[in-house]
Every structure is written in C-alpha cells, then in structure tokens.
Image: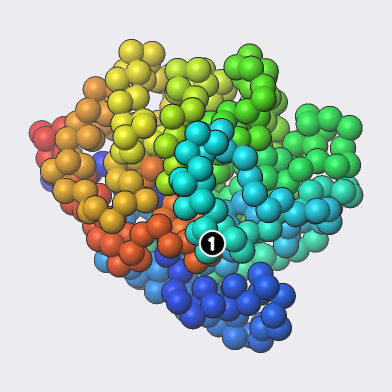
C-alpha cells in the first residue's frame, strides 16, 4: 500500500527568467516590445517553471504567474475602468517607525515598476482571453509531463480595491462588488480548466496596517466582511473544494510589528467560501499562531495550508524543520485536511530581488522532503 502523503504547494509567484524580466520591464516603461517575442518568452517560461516545480516535488503546481507583472495590478490589463492617477508609494504603518526599512522596501526594482491607477470609470472585462490563455498554457505544460494537480492564483476583489483607489463608485461596497462581478470571468475560466482557483487576499490582513490603517478594529472587521461577501458573490458558481484563499500580511522585508493578530480576523475569514485557507506559519511574526488556531479550532469543513518555508530569506529550511512544523500543525487540524505551503510568493512583482531564484526552488524541494518525513510519522 502506498504511503499517504501530505501534499505541498506554494502561493503563486515564482522567479521569472532574466530575459522575461527585461521584456516586462520594457513594457512597464512603455518601451515598444515585439509582442510575439514576449508571448514566446512567457510560453517558454511557463514550460520551464512547471518542470522545475515537478523536479522539486511540488504536488499542486501552477504557472508561476509568468504572464503577470504583479499578483494584483495585472488586472488593469484585463479590466476597464482604471484610468486615474497611479499610486507611487503605498502606506505601511510598520514602516513609519523604521525609515531605513521603508527605503529598502521602496528600492526593490519590482516595486518601482508597479503601477496602480485609480478607478475612474465603470469596471468591465475587456480582455477575457488572457485568463483562458493562461490556463491553456498551464494545462498543456502539466499534461505533457503527466501532472494533473494544478492551481492558478487570481487577485481577489478585496485586494484589487486595496491597490486601486476608488474615484468612481459611490461606496466601497458598490466598488468591491463591481470588481467581483468583473473578476468572475477569470475565476470561472480557471475552474473550467480543471484547476483549483486561489484567491489572493492580502486585504484581509495586510489591509489593517496599510489602506485601512486609520480604521479602528471594528471598522476594519466590517470592511473585510464586505470584501468576503463580494468574494463569495464572485465564486458562487464554483464548488468550495475547488477554491482556496491566501491570507497575507504583506510580502515585504519590514518589521511587521503592526500586523493584525490572526485571532482578530479568523472568524471572518472562515465565512469565505474557499475550502482551503493558506496562512503564514514560517516567518517570525506569525510562526506562533498555530497555537492560536489550535486553541480556537478550525471548522470541520475547512482545510489548512500553513506556510512552512519563508520566501524572503535565502536560508533553505531544513527538511526536518519542515517536518517539525507540520507535526505542530497536525495538532491543529487532522493531517488528512492539511497541506504544506509557503508564506507568500517568491516574486510577487516582476524583478523582485528578495531571494536568489535558484534558492527558491531548493526551498521548495526541502518543503517536499519535509512532507515526506512528516507523513511517515503522521500516517504511521
């Protein structure tokens, strides 16, 4: 009888090849680029990134977000309405206490190229083919290698409203529901391709110390409740077992000492439709919260995918450490409902320089090895 295994995955973005980064930087700088050369570079990158994930032993793989300049701001190329002034510097409350850290975060090349114009018109889908093309390429690359378990990440309505200011709709609720209806096409395109849909939801945690920092806790909880209502509206036609969501406090090398505790938001998070919730569990600000969730409990219809490796550090976590962390999480939830993940993406913006690309895949290999070690113990 085959050994049962705890599956492993990651959060979405993976390091892009240098040639693709150069082409996408040129696009960001409005330098003319041969569209066929860009398409070819993306196709080749997807093919290579799928192989690298399989080689590392990752169970549920994706396209590494190769076609996207950033995990959230890519939507301006697929939806209409974002024609206003672009935000240059986002506010992070924790960075106000440490100006040198703020300079380091702002200096990352990937962040400097990011653009997020405000919403000034009604939001509609203008490039619905892009999501379909993404899935066609991913399915083909995975199928060619006999790998069936795939996912694709997509910006949630809440995180889009977080990055793109609203200068058109009468209220936040009207705005986020308009986004939700427009993004429904992308979510359903992913699901129709047979992949798991991952909703990226930094608004539910990072929003507390960024865009919603002036709100008190009760106001913030009300805001994210509306965001989750919009998310549920957008995925109403997709089965809950085909959905997962990423809870994120922000993938940047800041102090994070103003992060909202998971205990203050988790009851609201559980109301979201996705069956699997990805949480941060490896970094030094949230590694302790497995004990919090152990005390509070996890609803019986939910699954957890805690981060067991950290995407900002070039340290390669030892497989035994990964196994230890998995064993801790097995005290929170039955191992049958457990998946191993990464705290966040390795390259959330094109050209991010937080980590050596080769180290990223070594970390994923260590993640897979740790799952094997833990599974032998947990399923003995």
- Tell me residue 31's x, y (percent): 69, 80
Q: Quadrant of residue 144?
A: bottom left
Residue under the image location 49 percent in, 28 percent down: 258
Judged left or right of residue 101, residue 169 is right
Q: Residue at x 89, y 32 (%)?
A: 170
Quarter holding the N terminus is: top left
The residue that appears at 22% across and 53% down in the rendered structure is 316
In the image, taking residue 137 as reference, residue 115 lies left or right, namely right
How are the colours assigned in the image? rainbow
Q: Quadrant of the C terminus?
A: top left
| Spot occupied by residue 356 in the image (x, y as percentages of width and height) | 33, 64
Q: Residues within 10 Å of mark 1 (few under 14, many from 20)?
A: many
Q: Mark 1 sits on what residue?
A: 110
**Label tally:** 1
Q: Position of residue 51 (x, y in %)?
A: 35, 70
Q: Position of residue 330 (x, y in %)?
A: 24, 28
Q: Which residue is at a point 21% across and 48% down the rendered structure image?
A: 317
Q: Residue furthest front?
A: 99
**Residue 345 shows in this picture:** yes
Q: Depth check: 67 or 109 in front?
A: 109
Horizontal relation, residue 218 to residue 106: left or right: right
For the question of whether residue 150 can be seen, the reply is no
| In-image side of 139 versus 227 (left or right) | left
Q: Is residue 145 above or below residue 116?
A: below
Between 77 and 315, the one lying in front of the other is 315
Q: Is residue 93 above or below residue 131?
A: above
Quarter-wise, where is residue 147 in the image? bottom left
- Along the viewing direction, whichever of 61 and 107 lies nearer the viewer: 107
Q: Secondary structure at mark 1?
A: helix
């Amino acid at each position: 009888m085959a050994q049962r295994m705890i599956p492993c995955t990651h959060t979405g973005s993976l390091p892009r090849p240098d040639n693709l980064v150069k082409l996408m930087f040129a696009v960001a700088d409005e330098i003319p680029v041969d569209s066929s050369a860009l398409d070819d570079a993306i196709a080749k990158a997807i093919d290579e990134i799928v192989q690298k994930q399989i080689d590392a032993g990752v169970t549920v793989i994706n396209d590494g977000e190769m076609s996207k300049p950033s995990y959230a701001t890519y939507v301006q190329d697929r939806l209409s309405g974002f024609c206003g002034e672009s935000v240059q510097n986002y506010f992070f409350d924790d960075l106000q206490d440490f100006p040198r850290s703020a300079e380091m975060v702002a200096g990352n090349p990937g962040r400097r190229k990011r653009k997020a114009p405000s919403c000034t018109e009604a939001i509609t889908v203008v490039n619905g083919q892009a999501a379909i093309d993404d899935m066609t390429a991913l399915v083909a690359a995975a199928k060619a290698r006999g790998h069936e378990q795939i996912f694709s990440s997509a910006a949630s309505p809440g995180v889009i409203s977080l990055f793109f200011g609203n200068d058109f709709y009468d209220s936040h609720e009207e705005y986020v529901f308009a986004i939700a209806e427009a993004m429904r096409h992308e979510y359903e395109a992913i699901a129709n391709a047979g992949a798991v849909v991952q909703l990226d939801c930094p608004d539910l945690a990072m929003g507390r110390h960024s865009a919603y920092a002036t709100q008190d806790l009760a106001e913030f909880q009300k805001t994210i409740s509306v965001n989750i209502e919009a998310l549920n509206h957008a995925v109403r036609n997709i089965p809950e077992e085909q959905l997962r969501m990423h809870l994120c406090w922000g993938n940047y090398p800041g102090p994070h000492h103003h992060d909202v505790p998971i205990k203050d938001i988790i009851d609201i998070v559980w109301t979201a439709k996705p069956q699997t919730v990805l949480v941060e569990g490896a970094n030094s600000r949230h590694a302790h919260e497995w004990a919090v969730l152990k005390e509070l409990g996890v609803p019986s219809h939910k699954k957890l995918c805690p981060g067991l490796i950290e995407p900002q550090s070039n340290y390669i976590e030892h497989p035994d450490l990964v196994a230890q962390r998995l064993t801790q999480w097995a005290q929170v939830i039955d191992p049958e409902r457990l998946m191993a993940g990464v705290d966040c993406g390795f390259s959330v913006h094109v050209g991010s320089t937080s980590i050596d690309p080769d180290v990223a895949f070594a970390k994923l290999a260590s993640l897979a090895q740790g799952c094997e070690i833990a599974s032998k113990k947990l399923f003995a």
